[in-house]
């Protein structure tokens, strides 16, 4: 077991009771560098910018009078951080608020919780973490509508997929006039690197280049993650790096993986070298509940 897996295994793969009282010690920070080294990504010279955006659908606490307060919590922090938060540890940490009392009113309770969570996450991850609570009248903002299903460009009858461990050699390109491509792959699957439980998601890809990545090769490559064991953020960065290595350095590239929720939490990593995809700003915006696919 490598260092990352040892750290992640504090809660993952184990029966955990958690804590009914607020406990910041439940949080686990995972260093990004170990996985990034495999793909020649340097923390101090990242080939992309971006954020990890999280949604926790089951956050709850109480006022001092024992009145339950329940909200959807949106969280984000920059991908240039040294650490990411392990998702089960985040769930256990947030659950520790369930029976803890804060404030004399709902609004006061939420404000206190917001300040505590931002402080704890920022201290644990050694970067600025920001959160926002949404209530039931929050408007749902649709994003990535201009991305086309990649299967629209593929002949299923002639497509054979046989590799299910990440296989970048499957990717093929052809030289064409410079063009922009907006593609959506709705069948991304990878697996937790510790528990090996499956994670499903949608991938949104934009690139502008004189190199056209053949769609059938892209489907084969993305399907090769079905038996890959990595965290969501790592998969997004792996895909970005493989595609960046195919394209020229001055080409525009955007990769966003919107994973479906597991344990009441979903994760949406974004990696890009451009500002072309304005919808990404809506996903990053803490004031917006932005959704990009039916599984979210």
Image (cartoon, helix red, strand yellow):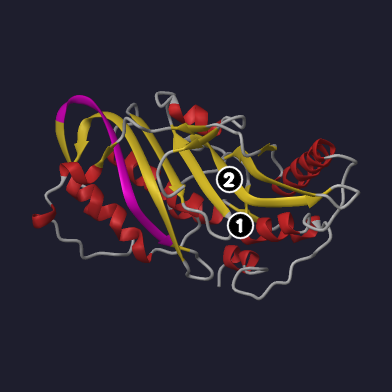
Q: Characterize the local packing of mark 2: few (<14), some (14-19) or many (20 or more) Cα atoms within 10 angstroms.
A: many
**Sequence-wise, which precedes: disc 1 or disc 2?**
2
In this picture, which residue range is highlighted in magenta? 176-190
136 and 46: which is toward the camera: 136
Residue 228, quarter of the rendered image: bottom left
Q: Residue at x 30, y 59 (%)?
A: 224
Which mark, by number, is residue 87?
1
Tell me the quarter of the image containing the N terminus: bottom right
The x, y position of residue 164, in whole percent, is 30, 64
Residue 222 visible from this viewpoint = yes
Residue 20, quarter of the rendered image: bottom right
Which mark, by number, is residue 37?
none
Callout 1–callout 2 Cβ contact below 8 Å: no
Q: Is residue 110 left or right of residue 135?
A: right
Q: Residue at x 42, y 32 (%)?
A: 143
Q: Is residue 65 left or right of residue 159?
A: right
The x, y position of residue 84, in whole percent, is 61, 50
The x, y position of residue 233, in whole percent, is 50, 50
């Amino acid at each position: 077991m490598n260092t990352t897996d040892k750290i992640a295994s504090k809660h993952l793969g184990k029966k955990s009771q958690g804590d009914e009282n607020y406990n910041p010690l439940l949080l686990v920070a995972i260093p990004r560098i170990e996985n990034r080294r495999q793909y020649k990504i340097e923390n101090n010279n990242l080939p992309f910018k971006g954020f990890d955006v999280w949604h926790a659908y089951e956050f709850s606490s109480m006022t001092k009078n024992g009145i339950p307060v329940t909200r959807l919590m949106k969280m984000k922090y920059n991908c240039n951080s040294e650490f990411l938060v392990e998702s089960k540890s985040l769930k256990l940490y947030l659950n520790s608020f369930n029976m803890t009392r804060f404030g004399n009113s709902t609004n006061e309770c939420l404000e206190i919780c917001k300040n505590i969570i931002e402080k704890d996450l920022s201290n644990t991850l050694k970067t600025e973490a920001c959160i926002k609570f949404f209530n039931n009248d929050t408007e749902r903002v649709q994003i990535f509508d201009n991305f086309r299903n990649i299967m629209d460009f593929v002949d299923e009858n002639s497509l054979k997929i046989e590799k299910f461990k990440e296989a970048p050699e499957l990717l093929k390109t052809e030289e064409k006039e410079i063009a922009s491509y907006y593609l959506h792959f709705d069948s991304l699957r990878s697996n937790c690197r510790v528990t090996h439980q499956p994670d499903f998601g949608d991938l949104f890809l934009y690139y502008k280049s004189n190199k056209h990545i053949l769609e059938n090769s892209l489907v084969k490559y993305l399907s090769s993650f079905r038996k890959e064991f990595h965290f969501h953020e790592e998969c997004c960065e792996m895909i970005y790096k493989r595609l960046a290595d195919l394209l020229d350095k001055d080409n525009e590239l955007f990769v966003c993986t919107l994973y479906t929720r597991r344990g009441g939490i979903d994760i949406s990593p974004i990696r890009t070298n451009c500002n072309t995809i304005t919808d990404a700003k809506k996903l990053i915006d803490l004031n917006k509940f932005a959704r990009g696919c039916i599984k979210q």
